[in-house]
């Protein structure tokens, strides 16, 4: 729970197809924990509640509890990418801010999420890190006022996170602004990257 009256919800995106990986990435293991569990661990001390947004075929496999709810993408946008998952959560949960995480960055930390939240400012719509010169919109914080805008983008078939970033007020934070361990943003797309992750952690 955060120490202010601002309500913050975590969104774990787990509705992708994992085609390159070959099986649902949320249930790959790192350090004896499912990938999605690492996302929960990094969020739980920083947010008031957590939504996992997944698809019907794997929804039942996630462990739910008082903090964690599992939902699906809106049917009309299933398979259209992360924006639908963010909208699904904003539509049923009333928070001020939403911390978004993918389910395939098992090295994400509580400290990183805490730092991202520390940049929240009522004047902006989103806090998005820039790592290795690239914006990281799937490990970022979004204000609830973006809900109608995200819905409009989806109706217009603008499904890319970039479409959102280009049309709202974003505070981009650099690697220098964040004290990083270096691996927090590493996402796992295929078996080769997964093997390397496990090897490097030995
Ligand atoms: N809720 C939701 N999450 C998604 C969707 N598409 C991707 N994600 C999530 O976004 C993150 C990054 O996804 P990607 O690795 O780009 O895509 P993927 O579909 O999981 O994998 P590939 O099929 O190999 O492209 C992962 O956590 C996915 O589960 C979607 O349509 N809905």
Image: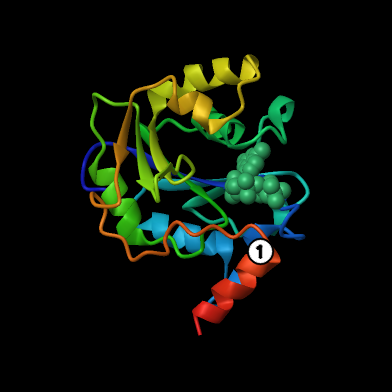
Q: Return the residue nearer the eye: 61 or 35.
A: 35
Q: Is residue 48 visible?
A: no
Examine the rendered structure and indicate whether residue 80 appears above or below residue 24. Answer: above
Question: Would you say 130 lies left or right of 124 here?
Answer: right
Q: Residue at x 38, y 62 (%)?
A: 109
Number of callouts = 1
Q: Position of residue 156 (x, y in %)?
A: 63, 14
Residue that lies at the very extreme toward the front in this rendered image? 133
Q: Position of residue 75 (x, y in %)?
A: 73, 29
Q: Label 1 neighbourhood size at 10 Å, few (<14), some (14-19), many (20+)?
A: some
Q: Residue at x 71, y 59 (%)?
A: 21
Q: Residue at x 57, y 57 (%)?
A: 104
User: Looking at the image, what colour scheme do you see?
Assistant: rainbow
Q: Position of residue 91 (x, y in %)?
A: 53, 27
- The answer as to whether callout 1 falls within 8 Å of ligand 1 is no
Q: Position of residue 84 (x, y in %)?
A: 61, 31
Q: Residue at x 67, y 30 (%)?
A: 74
Residue that lies at the very extreme toward the bottom in this rendered image? 202
Question: Would you say 38 lies left or right of 6 here?
Answer: right
Which quadrant of the figure has residue 29? Answer: bottom right
Examine the rendered structure and indicate whether residue 60 appears above or below residue 161. Answer: below
Examine the rendered structure and indicate whether residue 125 appears above or below residue 155. Answer: below
Examine the rendered structure and indicate whether residue 108 appears above or below residue 202. Answer: above
Disc 1 is placed on an element classified as helix
Q: Which residue is mark 1?
A: 27
Q: Is residue 87 visible?
A: yes
Question: Would you say 140 lies left or right of 187 here?
Answer: left
The picture quadrant for ligand 1 comes to top right
């Amino acid at each position: 729970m955060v120490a202010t009256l601002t309500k913050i919800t975590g969104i774990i995106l787990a509705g992708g197809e994992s085609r390159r990986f070959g099986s649902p990435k949320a249930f790959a293991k790192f350090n004896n924990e499912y990938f999605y569990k690492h996302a929960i661990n990094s969020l739980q001390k920083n947010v008031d509640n957590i939504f996992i947004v997944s698809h019907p075929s794997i929804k039942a496999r996630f462990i739910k509890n008082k903090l964690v709810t599992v939902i699906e993408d809106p049917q009309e946008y299933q398979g259209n990418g992360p924006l639908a998952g963010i909208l699904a959560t904003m539509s049923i949960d009333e928070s001020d801010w939403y911390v978004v995480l993918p389910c395939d960055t098992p090295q994400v930390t509580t400290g990183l999420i805490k730092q991202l939240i520390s940049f929240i400012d009522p004047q902006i719509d989103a806090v998005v890190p820039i790592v290795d010169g690239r914006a990281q919109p799937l490990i970022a914080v979004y204000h609830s006022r973006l809900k109608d805008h995200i819905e409009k983008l989806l109706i217009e078939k603008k499904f890319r996170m970039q479409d959102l970033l280009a049309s709202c007020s974003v505070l981009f934070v650099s690697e220098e602004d964040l004290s990083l361990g270096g691996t927090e943003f590493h996402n796992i797309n295929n078996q080769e990257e997964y093997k390397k992750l496990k090897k490097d952690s030995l």
